[in-house]
Amino acid sequence: MAKTLFEKIWDEHVIYQEEGKPALLYVDRHYIHEVTSPQAFEGLRLAKRKVRRPELTFATMDHNIPTTSRLLPVSDQLAAVQIATLEKNCAEFGITLFDLSSPYNGIVHVIGPELGLTLPGLTIVCGDSHTSTHGAFGALAFGIGTSEVEHVLATQCVWVEKPKVMEVNISGSLSRGVSAKDLALYMIRKIGVSGGSGYAIEYRGDTVEGFNMDERMTLCNMSIEAGARCGLVAPDEKTITYLRGRRYAPKNNAFEEAAEYWRSLKTDQGASFDKTVKIDAHIVAPQVTWGTTPAMAVDVTDVVPHPDSFEDPVERKAVERALEYMGLKPGTPITEIKVDRVFIGSCTNARLSDLEAAAKVVKGRRVASGVRAMVVPGSQTVKREAEERGLAKIFREAGFEWRESGCSMCLGMNQDILAPGERCASTSNRNFEGRQGAGGRTHLVSPMMAAAAAIAGRFVDVREWSFE
Amino acid sequence: MHPFKTFTGLVAPLDRRDVDTDQIIPKQFLKLIERKGFGNYLFFNWRFDERGEPKADFVLNQSQYKKASILVTRSNFGCGSSREHAVWALLDYGIKTVIAESFADIFYSNAYKNGLLLITLKPDEIDTIMKRATEGTLYLTVDLEAQKVSEPSGLEYRFEIPKFIKDRLLEGLDDIGLTLKHESKIAEYEAKMKTARPWVIPAKPSPKKTSQSG
């Protein structure tokens, strides 16, 4: 029978299932971090259980760590306790940890692929909703809660209800100045923040095939913002080339054998999807969110919408509330919205090619006066490479702060937060109320758009700018 | 986890859609390493102002709703971050059941694993309950066994719930214990995979560092 990519991976990993109940799925990779794991380890300890497969479990610290110098102790006492707790738990249970002194430390969804831990055909879970990112490699990857983290630690399995599968078919090329992030925001606008609930999304079409791995990761990363727990892209030669020689990837013959299998991981002709959404990439403009969900976005050339233009009374109320929180008046052109802060970072948009795209826009220009802009690389590896390639210098000379890696202002668990009322152009994934700091106002954009906003002090249509 | 028992509780109306887990429990409270004590921080940014004083306009700060154990809200409740702390905060506050048009996937599974019952009703039924809870004091009896929610007047709302979730909640079962009954199947799978797909086991790290990330 013809199968989708999702079904192929799913079927390979089902250990046990009863009719009408969730399946018991084997987990090939379990990534953990300091914030959603302490209670899971505590549960193991109380029940006197062990970690079943420590060699399939990898830990990093990313959510609450400072992005200032790593030579200094962590000043936030609660964060320091969480960090120490993870160190202790990993030592006690025999888990590899990329701690703050490791050259491989970074955001979990950046280092997994970077280290060759994330591979096609694997099941990957992590106590973080953006685990969908790893689907870019043709892996079945999704976020879980802390009870499930404990369950995976103890059993190397997870109970999951089989989702339906949605095809998002994207064709045509993106215009210069438009990126995978804009495409993701455009899709969320189109299907809504719960449009993907109950589904796994497979991204297909010539646009996706043309994307490099970083772009595919950005797209899969944002699946959860459309409500889909996982997003997938079929592995191809780009995937294989990316993985060859990575630190934990299979070596020599084992790699070639694996690659042979990976090439078979694609949706068969004639396989059917439960739903199909088609997107024409060439009509996608740079997107800017104006509200407090990622679906509240418009083209940069557009204006802040009027609540009255929404028919559904519940939606109208949500829009009114969002505009009040965001301090925006209906009808204001997006390009007249001034920003106080700019954040280039997160598991969505802090890989090397994201920083390269932003640096191209920044090169030879200066951050507008009154704007505080920062770049937080996705990992220490990205940071080193960006420094080697001269990107850090471009950002610094333009007036950007160049930080150590981490989740940073994407969720503001460390000191990197907005003050109440501050407005930020951010390459992260969530513009929820208070996400970047209580009272802070987040506008989600691409790295190029964020870079341009930093220079202009307001949103601009980066397509109109000249850059390399 | 305690078995879920039929109860009668006060309903608090939270008339919003897409309530994300960042609102249910803001990030500054995710730094604790225990499961308890999160109720004080439930809906923190909506409940308290910058000085930590209760905001009068928030539903749980209004005297008639303070003791609520049922929350009624709109669609896509619990979207966003996977933080289970959101469920712990609701339970710790005293919320035993959330009634909504729909729930986000990760939140949904986090909830039943902790004994929090999520009930999905139709939009018009939500409208009715929202209206009654807003205009007066509404108590509902939640009967999971019979899959119904009822008002003292006798008016009933029936709801669907997957049988396995219902059974789990009623029995208060521990997931890991359940799974370990299948231990031999897990071991069998692992043995099979070791030969069928040996590359799944992470390779011993190469001595040199990776040279590119893009």
Image (spheres, rainbow, N blue to C red):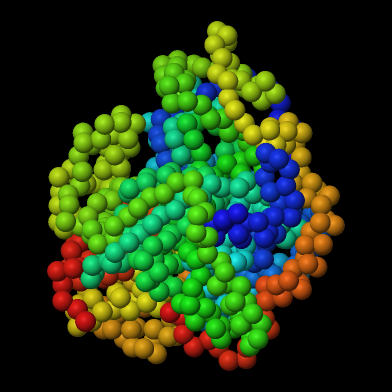
Q: Position of residue B115 (x, y in %)?
A: 67, 37
Give the residue drawn at x 39%, y 84%: A386
Residue A126 left/right relative to A270: right
Which quadrant is home to the N terminus of chain A?
A: bottom right
**Considering only vertical position in the picture, is A194 above or below B99?**
below
Where residue A111 sits in the image (x, y, percent)? 53, 74
Residue furthest to the top in view is B153
Whether residue A178 is visible here, answered yes or no, is yes
Question: In front here: A298 or A23?
Answer: A23
Q: Nearer the viewer, residue A293 or A12?
A: A12
Q: Quadrant of the C terminus of chain A?
A: bottom left
Q: Is residue A303 left or right of residue A245?
A: left
User: Residue B35, how many percent across, how many down?
Assistant: 65, 48
Decide if residue A62 is in sight here. Answer: no
The mark tally for this picture is: 0
Question: Percent x, y for residue A67?
Answer: 45, 73
Give the residue at x 25% y 35%. A310
Horizontal side, residue A29 vs residue B41: left or right: right
Residue sitting at 64 percent across and 59 percent down?
A: A37
Residue A22 falls in which quadrant of the image?
top right
Q: Looking at the picture, does residue B136 appear above or below residue B72?
A: above
Report whether B140 appears left or right of A396: right
Reply above or below: B107 against A431: above
The foreground one among A206 and A195 is A206
